[in-house]
Image (spheres, coloured by chain):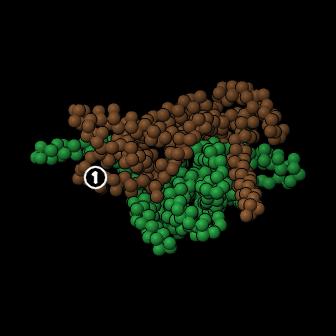
Chain colours: A brown, B green
């Protein structure tokens, strides 16, 4: 009896070791390209051309400086534009999605069922299929090279709305709203001062997701922004890809990619626990 | 009593007020553009040099052109092939990892791994693709590595399999972590007493997985697959940057949205409209299934429970 227990333990340990080996291999697969990226941001163009190395070089600041002073690529304004668009998108999307969710959650009105059904129905429609009409309308309204078409539409975010509603059902007791009403608070104040603070965890998670997806967005901005000073980072990367590649300083190429990727990775590593939990909250329960 | 009812009615007004921003925004920035896209698909409207042709109403001519001598069908095929190439390893590893992470006997330390495998999902696809382009270019780090190990170099971006493979590989890397976490949540939702019962009956890990886990997470698996297919239909950033919009070699890695993007840039609005409408219809058909999974979720659980009882 004792013997079989011992051998069972050995088998379990072998199984465990096997799992860890596969997991480590997959992790290497995920991290390898980022490792190459970080190493190559620190190496000069001739170094990179010479061949691959696992050891960092000393040209990090030179590369950064060269890139920021590159006359052909408005990198600094690109960074700033991406930051502005992403921040406004995150703020608008979370505030108004919570408001929409509150409207469905807390009030009873005639068209409630239809409104909810409608939002669920439009959830899966991709932005690309209405891009033609969108770009035409924006150019008719004189909004080319404006940030309005890239930020304001996030007010209507069905997926964030759905997430907020799910969270509200478990986190926001209606008694609280009733109590505030008895105390004489108006509906807008109830929302801003009672509902929003309670929804903070959900808002934080969704703000990160919206920020990241706006930061990474390429399709629509590329169709709307054509002035150099208005371009965002993904457009600059595409521009770099289209340029005559061999003439370009590879140290700068890697540095631009790093500038686009690393801010998101750093924020993610700091908040990863909340984010990973957020995905399961957001995915459909069941 | 009467007073209370009146008060109730007055609150309903706030429901409409709070819904208004969503619906007004949706109307202006999504619904009107969508209708306008449909409308445009029935017109001949394109640019020849600086000269504009149309707009002239042509009925279904744009659609006819697409189905008769079009490249769209080929590009849809490309999209599907690349999607399948990425989805098979994605679902395989996601199932494997989800099963391991939730295994009560193995009790793996999962925190770091979850963080690492989910990370590529948040990376800017354009930058990730650019990174892969530099890494897998003819004289890039990967080919350097191959040479130093004595393996002949491979021109990834000149070969059909190489280019499609790279796109599929990037899609796999970007999405398998996400799928793993969704499947984990599904498996953790299963009543643990079922696993307990299986263990007592002497079932091994594979039997437990096949007889209990798989049947019970089947609705979620279907959900994952369809949402991934809808996402795959929208594949754009990665192949666009990797191939500089050309879909080379020989347009075998051109996706449907890349084709749409091309028409939008050249202001060929009639064709762009028709392509959009076709893509819209395809996504709608797929979405109906997703919609079912979301709204009839409780029915599925009921069915599951009934099955559980029967099998016990």
- Would residue B247 be seen by someone viewing this image from the given angle? no
Residue B125: where, in percent of width, then height?
Answer: 60, 46
Left or right: A22 with respect to B207? right
Along the viewing direction, whichever of B223 and A181 lies nearer the viewer: A181
Give the residue at the far bottom of this rendering. Answer: B310
Figure quadrant of residue A192:
top left
The residue tagged 1 is: A112
Residue B229: where, in percent of width, then height?
Answer: 54, 60
Left or right: A84 with respect to A15? left
Give the residue at the far front of this rendering. Answer: A1
- Would residue A259 be seen by someone viewing this image from the given angle? yes
Q: Residue at x 72, y 34 (%)?
A: A41
Left or right: B92 with respect to B40? right
Along the viewing direction, whichever of B255 and A217 lies nearer the viewer: A217
Above or below B121: residue B62: below
Residue B95: where, in percent of width, then height?
Answer: 61, 60
Q: Residue at x 58, y 69 (%)?
A: B211
Residue B259: where, in percent of width, then height?
Answer: 56, 55
- Which chain hosts label 1? A
The local crowd at label 1, few if under 14, some if 14 to 19, many if 20 or more residues have their Cα within 10 Å, is: some
Along the viewing direction, whichever of B87 and A80 lies nearer the viewer: B87
Quarter of the image where the N terminus of chain A is located: bottom right
Give the residue at the far left of this rendering. Answer: B2
Element class at badge 1: helix
Q: Residue at x 64, y 32 (%)?
A: A72
Q: Residue at x 37, y 52 (%)?
A: A119
Number of numbered discs on residues = 1
Figure quadrant of residue A106:
top left
Above or below A35: residue B161: below
Figure quadrant of residue B3:
top left
């Amino acid at each position: 009896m004792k013997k079989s227990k011992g051998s069972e333990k050995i088998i379990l340990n072998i199984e465990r070791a096997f799992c860890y080996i596969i997991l480590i291999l997959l992790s290497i697969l995920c991290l390898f390209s980022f490792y190459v990226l970080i190493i190559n941001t620190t190496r000069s163009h001739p170094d990179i051309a010479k061949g691959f190395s696992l050891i960092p070089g000393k040209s990090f600041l030179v590369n950064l400086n060269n890139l920021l002073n590159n006359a052909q690529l408005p990198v600094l304004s690109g960074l700033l534009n991406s930051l502005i668009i992403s921040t406004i998108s995150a703020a608008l999307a979370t505030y108004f999605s919570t408001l929409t969710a509150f409207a469905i959650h807390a009030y009873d009105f005639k068209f409630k069922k239809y409104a909810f059904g409608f939002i669920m129905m439009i959830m899966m429609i991709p932005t690309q299929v209405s891009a033609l009409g969108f770009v035409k309308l924006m150019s008719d309204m004189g909004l080319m090279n404006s940030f309005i078409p890239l930020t304001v539409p996030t007010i209507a975010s069905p997926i964030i709305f759905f997430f907020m509603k799910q969270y509200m059902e478990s986190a926001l007791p209606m008694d609280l709203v009733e109590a505030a009403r008895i105390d004489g608070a108006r509906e807008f104040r109830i929302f801003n001062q009672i509902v929003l603070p309670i929804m903070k965890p959900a808002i934080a998670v969704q703000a990160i997701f919206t920020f990241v997806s706006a930061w990474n967005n390429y399709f629509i901005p590329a169709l709307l922004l054509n002035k150099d000073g208005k371009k965002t980072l993904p457009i600059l990367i595409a521009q770099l890809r289209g340029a005559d590649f061999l003439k370009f300083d590879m140290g700068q190429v890697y540095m631009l990619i790093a500038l686009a990727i690393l801010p998101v990775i750093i924020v993610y590593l700091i908040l990863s626990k909340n984010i990973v939990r957020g995905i399961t909250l957001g995915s459909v329960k069941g | 009593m009467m007073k209370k009812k009146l008060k109730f009615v007055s609150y309903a007004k706030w429901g409409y007020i709070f819904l208004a921003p969503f619906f007004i925004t949706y109307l202006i920035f999504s619904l009107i553009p969508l209708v306008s896209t449909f409308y445009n698909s029935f017109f001949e409207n394109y640019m020849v040099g600086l000269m504009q042709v149309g707009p002239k109403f042509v009925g279904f001519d744009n659609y006819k052109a697409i189905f008769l001598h079009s490249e769209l069908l080929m590009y849809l095929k490309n999209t599907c092939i690349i999607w399948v190439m990425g989805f098979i390893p994605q679902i395989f590893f996601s199932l494997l990892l989800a099963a391991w992470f939730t295994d009560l006997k193995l009790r793996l330390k999962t925190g770091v791994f979850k963080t690492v495998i989910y990370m590529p999902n948040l990376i800017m696809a354009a930058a990730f693709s650019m990174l892969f382009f530099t890494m897998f270019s003819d004289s890039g780090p990967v080919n350097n590595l191959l040479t130093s190990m004595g393996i002949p170099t491979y021109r990834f971006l000149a070969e059909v399999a190489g280019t499609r493979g790279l796109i599929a590989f990037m899609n796999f890397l970007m999405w398998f972590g996400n799928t793993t976490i969704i499947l984990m949540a599904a498996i953790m939702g299963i009543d643990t007493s079922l696993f307990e019962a299986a263990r007592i009956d002497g079932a091994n890990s594979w039997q437990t997985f096949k007889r209990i886990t798989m049947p019970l997470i089947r609705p979620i698996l279907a959900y994952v697959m369809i949402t991934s297919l809808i996402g795959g239909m929208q594949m754009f950033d990665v192949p666009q940057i990797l191939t500089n919009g050309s879909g080379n070699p020989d347009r075998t890695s051109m996706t449907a949205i890349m084709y749409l993007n091309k028409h939008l840039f050249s202001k060929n609005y009639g064709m762009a409209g028709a392509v959009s409408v076709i893509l819209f219809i395809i996504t709608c058909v797929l979405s109906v299934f997703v919609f079912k999974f979301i709204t009839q979720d409780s029915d599925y659980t009921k069915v599951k429970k009934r099955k559980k009882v029967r099998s016990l």
